[in-house]
């Protein structure tokens, strides 16, 4: 008969290996605890939002990983060079997010609400990418609850003030 300790040891070892492999596969820029992002301002309908700008590949890879929960008037905007189907995932996030994809004209092409983080070894192995319904040029990440609190719908429009 297998004891509880005999069963937990292989599971613990596997979790540690998965965690180490996960951290080794992250690009070196995203492993840094402190990454500086330029800041800007956008409007979503009538709501002003201070954003961190992820406009380079290392910044986009790093995203909001390891950051503490943001106030509901702050977020991160991912800026891409050309429209495409840009997927995001919640690896090493510390809080749930609302995510909104926008086209070149600031129209919403996809909304995901209350996306949970993937921060434990088991969650990281099963963490799924969120793929939008249409091509986007911008993706906005906000603390979960932002969409409902501000009545954001598919008819809402993004206005870039400064990024």
Image: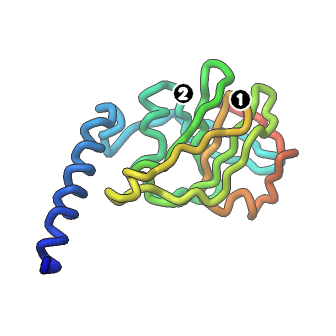
The spot of residue 13 in percent (x, y) is 16, 58
Find residue 138 and report its horizontal and vertical position in percent.
66, 32
Foreground pick, 57 / 39: 57
| Residue 72 located left or right of residue 4 | right
| Eye-nearest disc, 1 or 2 | 1
Q: Where residue 76 appears, x then y in whole percent?
A: 57, 43
Task: Give the structural element (helix, strand or loop) at label 1.
Answer: loop
Q: Residue furthest top?
A: 82
Which residue is depicted at the point 58% across and 59% down?
Answer: 71
Quarter occupied by residue 130: top right
Query: In the rendered image, which quarter contains the N terminus?
Result: bottom left
Question: Would you say 58 lies left or right of 82 here?
Answer: left
Q: Secondary structure at mark 2?
A: loop
Q: How is the image coloured?
A: rainbow
Does 31 appear above or below 162? below
- Decide: marks 1, 2 in contact (CB < 8 A)? no
Q: Which residue is mark 2?
A: 55
Quarter of the image holding residue 84?
top right
Pick the residue in front: 58 or 1: 1
Mark 1 to mark 2 CA distance (whole Å): 17 Å
* Residue 58 to residue 6: above or below: above
| Numbered label attached to residue 27 | none
- Residue 44 to residue 12: above or below: above
Mark count: 2
Residue 126, image x, y percentages: 43, 52
Q: Earlier in the sequence, mark 1 or mark 2?
A: 2
Q: Nearer the viewer, residue 57 or 133?
A: 133
Q: Residues within 10 Å of mark 2 (few under 14, many from 20)?
A: some
Taking the spot 16% from the left edge, 62% from the top edge, the residue there is 10
Q: Residue at x 81, y 36 (%)?
A: 107
Towards the viewer: 79 or 5: 5
Which residue carries the number 1 mark?
Answer: 135
């Amino acid at each position: 008969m297998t004891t509880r300790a005999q069963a937990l040891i292989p599971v613990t070892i596997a979790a540690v290996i998965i965690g180490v492999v996960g951290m080794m596969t992250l690009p070196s820029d995203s492993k840094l605890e402190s990454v500086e992002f330029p800041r800007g301002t956008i409007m979503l309908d009538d709501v002003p939002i201070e954003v961190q700008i992820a406009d380079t590949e290392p910044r986009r890879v790093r995203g909001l990983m390891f950051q503490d929960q943001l106030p509901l008037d702050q977020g991160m905007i991912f800026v891409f060079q050309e429209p495409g189907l840009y997927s995001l995932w919640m690896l090493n996030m510390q809080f749930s997010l609302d995510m909104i994809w926008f086209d070149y004209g600031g129209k919403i092409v996809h909304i995901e609400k209350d996306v949970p983080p993937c921060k434990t070894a088991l969650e990281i192995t099963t963490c799924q990418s969120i793929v939008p319904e249409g091509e986007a040029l911008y993706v906005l990440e906000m603390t979960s609850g932002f969409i409902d609190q501000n009545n954001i719908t598919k008819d809402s429009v993004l206005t870039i003030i400064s990024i």
